[in-house]
Each structure stands twice: as C-alpha cells, then as structure tokens.
Image (cartoon, grey):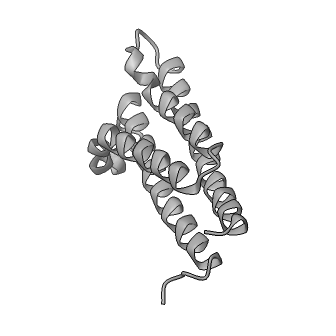
Amino acid sequence: MTAIATTMSTLRLARVLRPAGLLLLLIGIAGYALPAGPVHWTALIPAMLGGLALAAARLRHPYAAAGLGALVCLIALMGGGSALPQLPAVLAGEAGPATASRAATALVALLTLAGLALALRRGRGADGQGAR
C-alpha cells in the first residue's frame, strides 16, 4: 500500500469508527443512566466498546484500525445479537430498556461491520488492487 492509499484508507475507516464509537458511548450511558431503579454495571459495556472504537479510529495503520473495529463489533454482536429477534417488540415499545439497549448495540455493530468492509474495499481500489 502506498502512503496516499494508506492515509485514504485510514480516513475512510475513521469516518466509520468515530460515529459508531459515539453511538455506542451514547447507548451505554443511556442504558445505565435512564432506567429507573438499580442498573448493573454491565449496562456500560457498550460505552466501553464505543471507547475502543474511538481508539481504533485514531490508529494510523488501516488494517490495525479495521481489525480492532471488527473485534469491537464482534464483541457487541455476541452481547447484543440475542436481542435482534426481539426488534419488532423493541420498535413497538413493548420491550424493556435492557433489550432495547442490546438491540441498538447489535444494530450499530452490524452497520459498522458493513461500513468497515466497504471502507477497506474502497481503500484497496485506491491502491489499484480493487476487485476485478
């Protein structure tokens, strides 16, 4: 990869990871602060994952950033993926805040994985090694 292609790939990945990190931070903080009554500290896990995604956005090597971003997404999917089948209940307002938080975390992770794949694919195209 040339220096220009590396810089462009890093910028594309950062454009995906920053919003994902911010969304995960907001989901984690809202999941911990908004429900009435006691909330377990594990409600902050999405916020921790958001912090990791923001750290990944600052990495200079595109494959390291993509790898850490993908790891964050996989961890988020392992924790929140079980809530995806309950998404209709979440959208109808029938699910609790914990289910809504897990579903939102899983949706952000899925969208971020797609964005990372697209950013890497475009980065390869900028280097002249795109899909043929």
Query: Where 94 falls versus 31 (above or below)?
Result: below
Residue found farthest to the bottom: 132
Q: Residue at x 65, y 62 (%)?
A: 6
Residue under the point 35% across and 49% down: 87
**Viewer-nearest residue: 95 or 74:** 74
Count the labels in the image. 0
Q: Is residue 38 above or below residue 22?
A: above
Q: Is residue 31 above or below residue 61?
A: above
Q: Quadrant of residue 9?
A: bottom right
Residue 61 at x, y percent in the picture: 59, 52
Q: Nearer the viewer, residue 86 or 68?
A: 68
Outermost residue to the top: 38
Q: Residue at x 61, y 56 (%)?
A: 13
Q: Nearer the viewer, residue 17 or 4?
A: 4
Task: Residue at 52%, 29% (x, y): give it.
Answer: 47
Q: Residue 120: image x %, image y %?
A: 54, 66
Residue 92 can be seen in this image: no
- The answer to whether residue 2 is visible is yes
